Image (cartoon, rainbow, N blue to C red):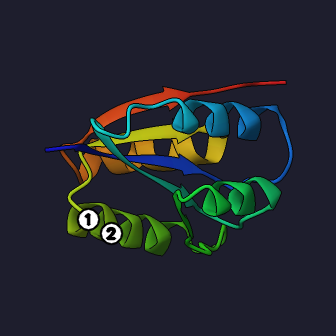
Amino acid sequence: MRTNVVHLVDDLKIGGLERTLATTVENLDKAKYKVSIWCLIGGGRIAEELREKGFDVRVLGFSVSAKIRSLVRLAWRLRKEKVEIVHCWGISGAVSYTHLRAHETSLHLVCRLLLE
């Protein structure tokens, strides 16, 4: 049985963090991991490239101003999808999920902060 992994990121516009995420998911063992990429706010060019390669990329369209409601929706989705590992990319994803992790879930967490 494959481990269910979600990569959590704000968006997948062109940038170093986004390319690193793409390279990471493209090189994971598909026999071991079921990989999804969830964009909290919006998609982007790299999101489309990953979709074309067959990856599950979802744009959740969360509002920055409605953070609490967005966190509750995120927690619900993670439980519903039976996600086992969440890999957070960037500040918003890491901060949002760290708060969520502390209060709502029992999932494994990987945070990666790439600061410019």
- 9 in relation to 33, above or below: below
- 82 in relation to 115, above or below: below
Give percent across and percent down for residue 112: 56, 27
| Along the line of sight, the residue nearer the viewer: 95 or 111 | 111
Which residue is rendered at x = 69% and y = 30% of the image? 20
In the picture, measured across the screen, residue 32 lies left or right of residue 92, that is left
Q: Secondary structure at mark 1?
A: loop
Give the foreground label among 1 and 2: 1
- Under mark 2, the amino acid is Arg
Quarter of the N terminus within the rendering: top left
Q: Give the number of the disc on residue 57.
A: none
Residue 58 found in image quarter: bottom right
Residue 2 found in image quarter: top left
Residue placed under numbered mark 2 in the picture: 77
- Separation of marks 1 and 2 at Cα, in angstroms: 6 Å
| Along the line of sight, the residue nearer the viewer: 20 or 98 | 20
Give percent across and percent down for residue 108: 27, 35
Outermost left residue: 1
What is the total number of numbered labels drawn onto the structure image? 2
Residue placed under numbered mark 1 in the picture: 81
- Under mark 1, the amino acid is Glu
Which residue is rendered at x = 73% and y = 63% of the image? 48
* Cβ–Cβ under 8 Å for marks 1 and 2: yes
Give percent across and percent down for residue 107: 23, 42
Which residue is rendered at x = 75% and y = 36% of the image? 19
Packing grade of label 2 (10 A; few <14, some 14-19, many >=20) is few
In the picture, measured across the screen, residue 107 lies left or right of residue 92, that is left
